Image (cartoon, rainbow, N blue to C red):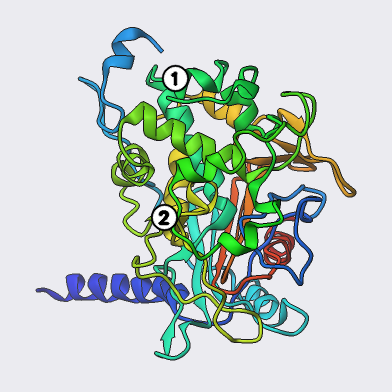
Amino acid sequence: MNAPWQWLMALLLTAVVAACRGGEPAPSGPVVPPAVTSQPAASQPVTLQPMPAASAAQNASSAEAACAIATPCAGESAIPGPTAPDSAALDSAEAEAIDALLATVYDGAPFRGAVLVAHRGAVILRRGYGQADSAAGIANTPQTRFRLGSLTKPITALAILKLQAAGRLDGTQPVCAYLAACPPGWAEITLHHLLSHTSGIPDFTRFADFPSTTGQATTPLETIARFADRPLDFAPGARWEYSNSNYIVLGVVIEQVMGQPYAAALQELLFAPLGMDDSGYDTMESGLAVGYLPDGSEAAFLHMSIPFAAGGLYAGVEDLYTLDRALMGEDLLPRDLRDQMWTAHASIPGPGPAQGYGYGWVVSEGPQGKVVGHNGSIEGFSAGLRHYLGPDLLIVALSNEERRDPNRVLDGIAAIMLP
């Protein structure tokens, strides 16, 4: 190889090494707005409860329907993954500010997990913080898998909308049209109501006997049986109230429309086409980080058949970036359906800046435009994803510590990155 080529290869190697340093381990934490009124007190188990996405102030034809959902129709290209290359590392001052934030973000305690920041499609920071497994001395990395908790809901909603785009279902239709057995009291409930938490179906995670059931394997139909005959909390469409029960039902709708289990359906609809190899349904043998309490002890056991389509998925930060990039295009979901997903169909009550709920996403408006995202809390894990659509800034923070507010991380990084 002649001297000019040697010089060029050395330069490229130096750039690659610099870009990869963002994957080295360090502390952990995530960001989004205050928990909704259905959040449990800090002393309670953090099971399936939502922490919605942030407010900006804080911070088909019949021919198409016949095509296979997970594969392209004739003449179409497969769903592409992100095409933007990683940019150079953050400005050193910004990187140092983010590291300083995460080192003490929880009242002096560090963030533990992985963080990814992308601007206009280019990843500018991806790092692991703290330990994925303290006993084994395994560090968190950008490839570490974390439970998503309620950050599962945007992915379940996306699967429903993909089925709608393929002509397999219609969000305006009654849910009873898609269930083999449907309670009479649900006759007026549509898929729209379930997606937007306006159905009135009571949240089974708030039942008095729920804590006694968390260690037991449960089928989705067995879970539905626990709330199917209970009276609705309000008439469908009358108001908004977060209920994990809505997304358990949506998971069963996906299974019955697809004719296969939820886990396989999500793999076919989303994870395989997008190459999301570090995402899936948590079988408790999925090679995840160990979940901890803030005091460093291991979190309580939760059988992951219980959260199901409301909170049973896992992912790594890079896979969520891949999903986000696909959503910003039109190959994964038609623009009109994406806009419906990111439209506030109901207002979320509570103090603080106004927020609404779309289809699996919390939506708000701020000085730089629309902000969409969702948080998740589940035994051993906390999660947050927020996308500022105007400046196209994505922040993902996944943590293997429960009872950690992702908003502290999301808000803090947004304050560093946005004017």
Give the residue at mark 2. 319
Q: Quadrant of the N terminus?
A: bottom left
Of 331 and 83, nearer the camera is 331
**Quadrant location of the C terminus in the rendered image:** bottom right
Q: Is residue 87 among the parts visible in the rendering?
A: no
Task: Say left or right for 193 vs 411.
Answer: left
**Place of residue 86 in the rendered image (x, y in percent of width and height, measured from the top left):** 42, 59
Q: Of the residues tagged 1 and 2, which is closer to the observer?
A: 1
Q: Earlier in the sequence, mark 1 or mark 2?
A: 1
Secondary structure category for the residue under label 2: helix
Mark number for residue 79? none
Mark 1 secondary-structure assignment: loop
Which residue is depicted at the point 70% across and 59% down? 414
- Looking at the picture, does residue 202 appear above or below residue 61? below
Looking at the image, is 374 positioned above or below residue 10?
above
Q: Quadrant of residue 236?
A: top right
Q: What's under tag 2, amino acid-wise?
A: Asp
Residue at mark 1: 169
Q: Is residue 41 left or right of residue 326?
A: right
How many marks the image carries: the answer is 2
